[in-house]
Image (tube, coloured by chain):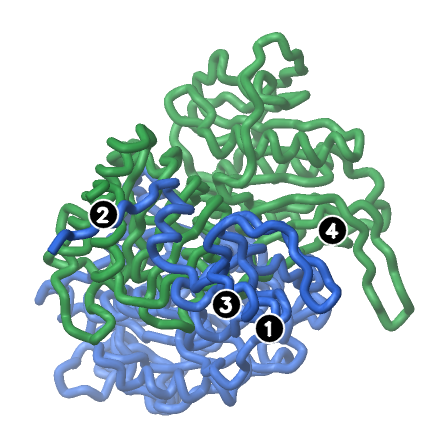
Chain colours: A blue, B green
Amino acid sequence: MLIITLFKGVPARTTRVVTIGGVLKREEMDIVMNPHDFKALEAADYIKRSVGGKLIALTMGPDVKLSPIVNSLFDAPIEGIDEGYVLSDRRMAGADTWATAYTVAKGIRKVVDVHVRPVETLISMVEGGAGTDELIGYCRELYNSNMLPNAIYSELPTIRNSTVTAFAKGELTREETLRRLRSSLEELRRFVVVAGIKTTDGETGSTGPQVAEALSEMNGGTIPSLTYVRDFDIHPEDGTIIVERKLGDLFQRLRSRLPCVLTISPEYRSRVPSVRSRKAALLRNYRCKVRRATIWNAGDIDADPSKIGLAGSPTIVGPGVDVGAPQVRKLVGVTKVCLRRVERFSLDGKTYGPFERGTKVDDLPHEVIEYLEERGDVGTFTLEMLIEEVFGVKRVVVERSG
Amino acid sequence: MSSNDLGDYRDVWVYCEHVDGELIRPTREIIAAARSVADLLSMRVVAIVLGYNLGDLVKEPVYYGADKVIYCDDHRLKDYLTLPYTSIVSDMVIKERPWALLFVANEMGRDLASRVAYRTLTGLAADLIDLKVEDFVAYTPQGKVTYPNLLAQIRPDFGTRIAKIFTPRHRPQISSVRPGNFKELPRDERRNGEVVRWEPRFSDDDFKVEVLESRYERRKETGLEDAKVIVSLGLGILRDSKGTVRNPREAYEMAQELVKLIRERFGVKAEVGASRALIYAELKELEGLVTKEMQVGQTGKTVAPDVYIALGISGALQHKVGMNRSKKIVAVNSDPNAPIFEIAHYCVVGDLYEVLPKFIEALRGE
């Protein structure tokens, strides 16, 4: 089965990339994998270990930033991914959720097609009465390029009864072989896409469900999306999945047909696959890992240029507006404030005031502040003043008598 | 849906979420939001209600400010399911051509809005904190194009900035609006409105997902939303300013002491809140004390108390959008560059383990 895990590259930190003035500190914008997507990877890894298949990571964005992340996932602390794809094209830049969903769905479609087509060809060869040598030769080539699961053809010593090998040995009739190949094909078409619930930079949580919707349109049949999944049980043999999810206060246990798109909640904890399922899992696995990210541009995935990137985005982000910091900010130990009410006064021919007790005077000319400090009218804002202003409570200082 | 004749699209729609025969509060808030926009453009507010055995619930949106209700009452809509709900809302949108459609930005709203927006080929702006009506000017290779009277969909951006999202060439303009940013209108049973039943058309595909179990699990109420004072804790409570490891329980207990004193002394509602970082750290010392219900921020509660005291909270954007409408924000943090200081009215760069006892002492009147 094809297990496709989506991830997004996001700025490494969202807390420190902006200065107090609101300016983006670009040098701190290292790109890392969106933290929520680790949960998706964890869930995808569980699927691979429990039922088998090929674990494929797919992402969209500049390949120079994203390929290193994909390459690091082959040796993740888990079993790691088997293949990685980066959808990278200048024309994809500036995409909103609609255009992103379309592009990512096109990428998924291509991944699935690439895996389905050789099996379709194989079926038509068997139907056309191809000889065993021809079939084995075709299968060996596909197997070595990682395009056939062990169930169809394998050179592993532990797997003796893969479909085409058994057919070549005369252990399977042509009809039985076709039935098994068609069932493998059906399983391949029942892929699963696993995504995080949202990203730390956009936070919209729209991509998972929208990818499902985009895939439905391309698939010509509805592909369900199951969001906020906390636990699941997947059954590729009959093409179903049972999930537990929580939408706010609403707890749901749902049974869905495959293919489908899951978004994984931070509360997900992966389980340990049973021994029995792991044995069956081996049959769905592929030969090995392809240890280098594959980069596809818009043409490679047959994307309509009018539906990707900025051009394909229904929404436009208008100019940002700085709503500004609070009008008056007082820093304990720094801000200068009036310690008592100051009546109107003149200094160097200019008049100032009156000021209420607690007024921040940092913006007054330096010499005016000095003048008021000398008079004892202005001092540094203290914690006691803060408590008084916030709670309206005056702290009573008790003079201790010797 | 894209069209050259965008003028055909009218009215501001609201998708209504309901539990136990009542509209949830955020739904009542977005009816008010829709009202404010619709009035500027002489449009109607149309509420859509989906479910089973709806009864008198279908009139509730009118009492809260809607002009019209379109409802769909069918046994197959008993439990929320993404696919049939998407099909019905999308069919309504395609046939009735609303100008805008608002959802609540909670888990269900996001789930549904995403698929509806993609299926009806239009834009989605998520997590809005405000709505306005504005002209939008685009500079295209063909020259300057002005789109008059668009929905300015306002969401938080980096730092103290906000971003305005526009959907100039597609209708409806679909948005999800965060709870706690609009004030619901008072319920008024004298208000009149049209109530129309919608007959659903389902396909087999709509039921590719079946419900095995579906129930509401009530969360423990914290009363954070209507507290007048909130004392909120972040991961900074793990160490004091000298870097010494502290038992976070100490800070928690001081915070509880502080809210207790505030309640006693001022007779107002005061509660302890927490940042997402602290809750997800799942500290043993705070087990059962700091729970998800206490979370303030984008994925937690949106609050606007009179006084918000942030202790050891760095102030990630996601936290700030949940509390930045508080009237007075006091931030205590040992890191002078903590982003929380950008929006705080009172900034204390220092050790919360020194500052907190002073607060308590002052309120005790010692």
Q: Which mark is residue B170?
A: 4
The CA distance from mark 2 to mark 4 is 56 Å
Q: Residues within 10 Å of mark 2 (few under 14, many from 20)?
A: many
Image mark 2: chain: B
The CA distance from mark 1 to mark 3 is 12 Å
What residue type is disc 1 on? His
Q: Which residue is painted at 57% across and 31% down in the image?
A: B201
Question: Residue A389, how many percent across, how many down?
Answer: 42, 46
What residue type is disc 3 on? Glu
Rendered position, B294 above or below A310 = above
Image mark 3: chain: A
Q: Is residue A295 visible?
A: no
Q: Residues within 10 Å of mark 4 (few under 14, many from 20)?
A: many
For the view shown, which residue lies furthest in the right direction? B143
The CA distance from mark 2 to mark 1 is 36 Å
In this figure, which residue is indicated by the disc labeled 3? A374
The CA distance from mark 3 to mark 4 is 65 Å
In this figure, which residue is indicated by the disc labeled 2? B360
What residue type is disc 2 on? Ile
Residue under disc 3 on the same chain as residue under disc 4: no
Q: Which mark is residue B315?
A: none
Rendered position, B155 above or below A165 = above
Which element carries disc 4, helix, strand or loop?
A: loop
Q: Are marks 2 and 3 in contact (CB under 8 Å)?
A: no
In this figure, which residue is indicated by the disc labeled 1? A366
In the rendered image, which quarter contains the C terminus of chain B?
top left
- Left or right of A172 on screen, residue A272: left
Judged by depth in the image, the label closer to the viewer, 2 or 3, is 3
